[in-house]
Image (spheres, rainbow, N blue to C red):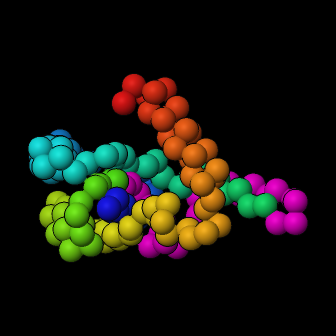
Amino acid sequence: MRYMMIVKATADSEAGTLPTEEQLATMGAYNEELVKAGVLLAGEGLRPSSEGARVSNTGGRRTVTDGPFAETKELIAGFWLIQVPSHEAAIEWASRVPLEGQEIEVRRVAEAEDFGEAFTPELQEQEERLRAQTAEQSGS
């Protein structure tokens, strides 16, 4: 099962405050643990919402809203994508994230079987083909 561990934004991350060398080293050690355990699929930090935008499409009309966005607690500062055998294992990894005072949200990634009959064999084949092309392009 794949899970996303989502790091919630803080006032510091939204202000663009960079981590210290010590914080980067601690995070690097945690990321090494994930890699050595064979569970890390991806992980990245995000720039502040002041450098982002939100795009909405309602009734065929596209609206773009430039950041920054209010409600820091609703924003994402980074993530890890991990593959583990259970929800409990994902929570265990999230509980070990070395970010003092930051909330980590754990969410399971939807898999093909979660979509039921609407995800026809043809659509599944298309999805598999696109994943293979993406992996090929990224060199995975």
Give 97 or 19, whichever is nearer the viewer.
97
Give the number of marks.
0
For the N terminus, give its image quadrant. Answer: bottom left
Residue at (43, 49) in percent of width and height: 46
Horizontal arrangement in the rendering, residue 84 relative to residue 137 (left or right): left
Q: Position of residue 8 (x, y in %)?
A: 38, 66
**Residue 61 colored magenta?**
yes
Q: Residue 117 sits in which quadrant?
A: bottom right
* 102 relative to 25, above or below: below
Res 140 → quadrant: top left
Residue under the point 31% across and 46% down: 41
Q: Is residue 34 above or below residue 106?
A: above
Q: Quadrant of residue 103?
A: bottom left
Residue 38 position within the rendered picture, expressed as x and y whole percent measured from the top left: 18, 46
Q: Which residues lie in the magenta part?
A: 58-79
Asked if residue 127 can be seen in this view, the reply is yes
Q: Where residue 24 sits: x, y (%)?
A: 20, 44
